[in-house]
Amino acid sequence: MMNEDLILDIMSCCPATEISKFRLLNKACNKRSYEFHFINHHLHKTNSVLGYFIQDHKKHRRPGFVVFGGAEEEAPEKPRIALEFLPSRGSNPFRYKIVRVSEPLPWERRKTSEGFNNLYCEVFDSDTYAWKRLNDLELRSDEFLRRSEKPESSYGLLHWLTGKNNVIQFCMQTETWSFFPLPEDVIGDGSSLDLVSYEGKLAVLCSNSNSRGGYDLWALDNSSGKSWANVKDVQVTDLEDKYAKPLWFLSNDVILVAGFVRLGLYNTNSNKFQYLHKTTQECLPYYLPRDVCFLFYSNFERICLHEDHTGRSKTKPKMKENY
């Protein structure tokens, strides 16, 4: 059996997209590979990139989310998605899917006899470079998706938390939906619940009403929703900003924290906070909700953005001038 340090050393030389395969070899290595020390070591040895996107649409008066509504002749009242920003086929990108869940127009809504309301679901697949309409997602009439709820991804599954503290799960491979409730132990007093990803697993971050800046972290051991474990007591303390709140875990010991005037990384082991960006009015909103921050950890590869998905150049050819 290979030594853990040797496995981690090999992993640190691999592209970011290959690390997930090595994490299946050893449980201890899997946990250590989520430590910030390893991630930082990996970034220095490979051409990988770790960072975050922050969505700021108010400054430019653009909509908060890019959506797709089909062909104009089918639904002229819906906004369409512009696909020019997607990687071209000639760049040999990873396979990806875009999932869109939307509310039907008032005259398109239907209610089943069991008291369910329907939501539209569409999927864009980079393999076919086309959109596909799936079966409607049906929710109980008293259930709803929070508009600010950003889906959390783990093990090829997307998860949303509903207003009734149920988890909606979408499988990217089978393109099917499933539901499961959060246990009472996880919900607690229900003052603040957020879905996060922790060590590759779906987790729930719950505010602790008995401790200022304290949170309980529950992780899901399997996709059935029946086995949850309290894996960590998170203490975000000694910050000048009393509104500071965790957004997501950069690693299992470093959290991105957003407050009223600050955004930074908080180390749970040392209780040290490193500012990343001053959220001033000229740059970003004073308060950053969870749905505008997106973590990415991937390989770095330059691609040609001057070609469409057929490989043809988007730039117009230069005309010869006659002198």
Image (spheres, helix red, strand yellow):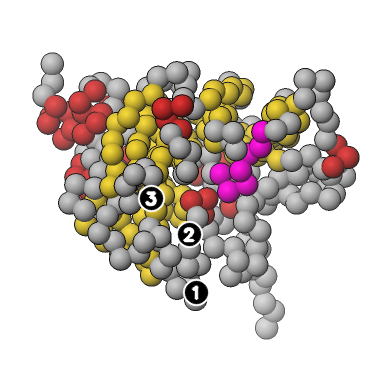
Q: Residue visible at 58% across and 48% down?
A: 148
- Dominant SS in magenta: loop
Looking at the image, residue 78 sits to the left or right of residue 145; the answer is right
As drawn, the label of residue 50 is none
Number of numbered discs overlaid on the protein picture = 3
Name the disc covering residue 246, or none: 3
**Figure quadrant of residue 206:** top left
Which is closer to the viewer, label 1 or label 3? Answer: 3
State the CA–CA distance, disc 3 to disc 2: 11 Å
Q: Quadrant of residue 276?
A: bottom left
Q: Which residues are magenta?
A: 143-149
* Amino acid beneath label 2: Leu
Q: Which amino acid type is marked by label 3?
A: Pro
Residue lying farthest to the front in this orientation: 210
Q: Name the N-terminal-most of marks 3 and 2.
A: 3
Q: Amino acid at mark 1?
A: Gln
Q: Alpha-carbon distance for marks 1 and 3?
A: 21 Å
> Compared to 236, does 162 lie above or below?
above
Residue highlighted by disc 2: 288
Residue 281's label in the rendered image is 1
**Where does the C terminus fall, quadrant-wise?**
bottom right
Q: Residues within 10 Å of mark 3 (few under 14, many from 20)?
A: many
| Disc on the earlier residue, 2 or 1 | 1
| Residue 34 rendering spot, x and y as whole percentages | 27, 37
Tell me if 241 is positioned left or right of 143 in this view. Answer: left
Q: Residue at x 59, y 22 (%)?
A: 178
> Residue at point 52% right, 58% down?
55
In this image, 250 relative to 100: left or right? left
